[in-house]
Image (cartoon, rainbow, N blue to C red):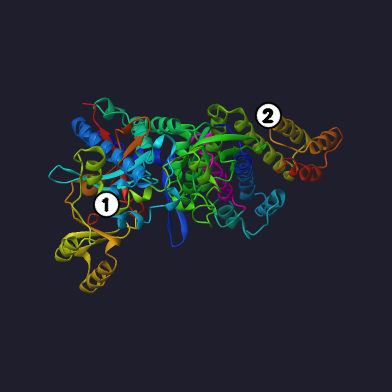
Amino acid sequence: MQELIRHTKTINRLLARYGVKFGIYKNGEFNEQLFPFDPIPRIIENSEFQFLEKGLKQRVNALNCFLSDIYGEKRIVRDGVIPEEFIFSAKGFLPPCDGVVPPKGIFSHISGIDLVQSKDDNWYILEDNLRVPSGASYPMIARELQRRSAPDAFSSNSVIDNRNYAELLKEVMDYVNTGGINVILSPGRYNAAFFEHSYLAEKTGAVLTTGKEIVCENDRLYYIDYLGRKQRIGAVYRRISDEYLDPMTFYEESVIGIPHIFEAYKKGSVALLNAPGNGVADDKGIYYFVPKMIKYYLGEDAVLMNAPTYLPYYEDDMKYVLDNFDSLVIKDVAEAGGYGVVFGSSLTKEKKAEFIALLKSEPRRFIAQEVIDFYDLDILDPDGKQVPRKADLRAFVLAGGETKVWPSGLTRFSRNPDSFIVNSSQGGGFKDTWVLSR
Amino acid sequence: MGIITVDKSDHLLWLGRYTERVYTTLNLYFQSADRMIDTTPDYYGEFCRKIGIENVYGSRKNFLRTYPFDENDPNSIISNLNRAYDNAIVMRDYIGTETMAYIQLAIDDIHSAGRSAAPIADLMLVIDHILAFWGCVNDMIDNEQIRNIIKLGKGIERLDLYLSLGLPDSNIIREYRRMKQFLAKSKLRYDDSVINTVDSMISESELNHPNVKNLLRNLIVE
């Protein structure tokens, strides 16, 4: 470990050399920033990883069953496990997807599951990201550069090599590919995660595109070269959100989508990773029901726990939330990226009254959770001193022929000692995640 | 991989052009800076005229400071380097992270040279990294067409600058012949008549530089 700490500057210099950046808009201006990297890794013992792996596979399998059911028979609603209001009023439920079966029946191919470990050693799921979860490329390239900077740190520890993420991703793309090339569809250079899009394209051998070179003809998708020759596309790992994907089906003013791509997908002639409509399953309101889904679809108890969550939609839960407001964190189900998160204790009397009025008028819009006292991880502060900071873990679960958990993940930390918010868009940094092989 | 679209060929071509523009104008800047030390202090006016940019600098001191480092000056070296970066960053999957890194390093160099006590000396690192970038293009990009489009861009830009600078015909002809080799290998669509006309002009005793320059502007068919 000391070797990694000693080589912090070298590692950061290499990360800068390879342009490991993320984009951020501030006051309407786009800026690229280096993603702050901390050299002290999160270490996960092998037995612990096996436990996480079991729970994560179970969760993603159940979520895939849920998506298949919701856009199919809707048994889970009919059987009263989830109230229909939570499904059909969810922003992520897309009526055009109703009845559509994606290639090989997989909806969430790449899932980013956010977890934290509490001080009582339990892991809790904070949220599921089943639309376009990002972040795998950062630990992937950081590992490569750390191995060059501090090789002894790896030869003296049994760390599972995490540089196979691109292979796992390619395996999934190939598995669902309907015949043709794989492409990564990016909104373009000024997207926050453009580094990741281009890096994953390079490493998987997929073609990076902004969609301008793609046409849909007779329900098939083609990539057009400079001589006008067409190559069929079999799988699109799209990194643009559902609403912008196809102006003919979704947001009609989208200029970054591909007209008629949804029709091609609907007819089964192209795979979209992840499937459109997945937002219904990673809605913060639906999160509450995931353990019930696991029981319902798989007949198993959830291996990994949710953070204790309350739905103000239910009368009893609303009462609990109002009685314990100061000790809870309230989340707006429509927000993401660390936005729309309110800690009850942080509000002034007036703001609290205002917020409670909003909560009462729109109970479906919020969930409330106990604040988990999660482990702090040490980071190096700018003076080189080790200081504790809040950190979470985004685990990546890839579902193709089988469901696999990448033996690593993105550990994000808050640089602010008083903050629980770890998102890069809000100043957070990242560290490597070591899974030990024994 | 390796399917080249109109947009991608355009980015590759301009990546070659902007890296060459940075390289040649920076070398010229070094020579001019040296000249301005004692013999011709206001030589920067001639420099601007030669490379066809507006002389907005007003003084030797301002030119030496602004021309390499001012991001608000569209003709500055840093602006051209930023444009090379803009074209490179969207082609990472084609040129590779290793190759891309040399453009990033050149950007870092120019920023640190701008903060340095010896900016002109430190700008030499930009040259080093542009040369390393071209080395990497040769060595690490497997796809021949991708390599040749970048080199074609480099060749077109070099010719354009050499023609503007009024370099001897022998230099122009050598660069023209090199550029033609890349043109054929790039498989891009081009206007045959431009090549035929320039070929016949070359056989004449003296080259008309402005005419050749204008003709070459329409070489690549969009």
**Helix, strand or loop for the magenta stretch, by majority:** helix
Quarter of the rendering occupied by the C terminus of chain B: top right
Task: Give how far across and how far down residue A371 sits, in percent.
Answer: 18, 55
| Left or right relative to A348: residue B124 | right
Say if residue A257 shows up in the picture: yes
Quarter of the rendering occupied by the N terminus of chain B: top right
Q: Residue at x 38, y 36 (%)?
A: A141
Task: Give how far across and how far down residue B182 sits, in percent.
Answer: 68, 31
Residue A240 is one of the magenta-drawn residues: no
| Left or right relative to A156: residue B199 | right
Q: Which residue is mark 1?
A: A82
Magenta part of the chain? B75-97
Q: Quadrant of residue B34?
A: top right
Which of label 1 and label 2 is nearer to you? Answer: 1
Considering only vertical position in the picture, is A362 above or below A78? Answer: below
Q: Nearer the viewer, residue B63 or A395?
A: A395
- Badge 2 marks a residue whose secondary structure is helix
- Let me know if marks 1 and 2 both belong to one chain: no
Q: Report the amino acid beneath label 1.
A: Ile
Task: Give how far across and how far down residue A31 sits, in percent.
Answer: 45, 54
Q: Quadrant of residue A309?
A: bottom left
Q: Which residue is mark 2?
A: B185
Spatial CA span between label 1 and label 2: 62 Å
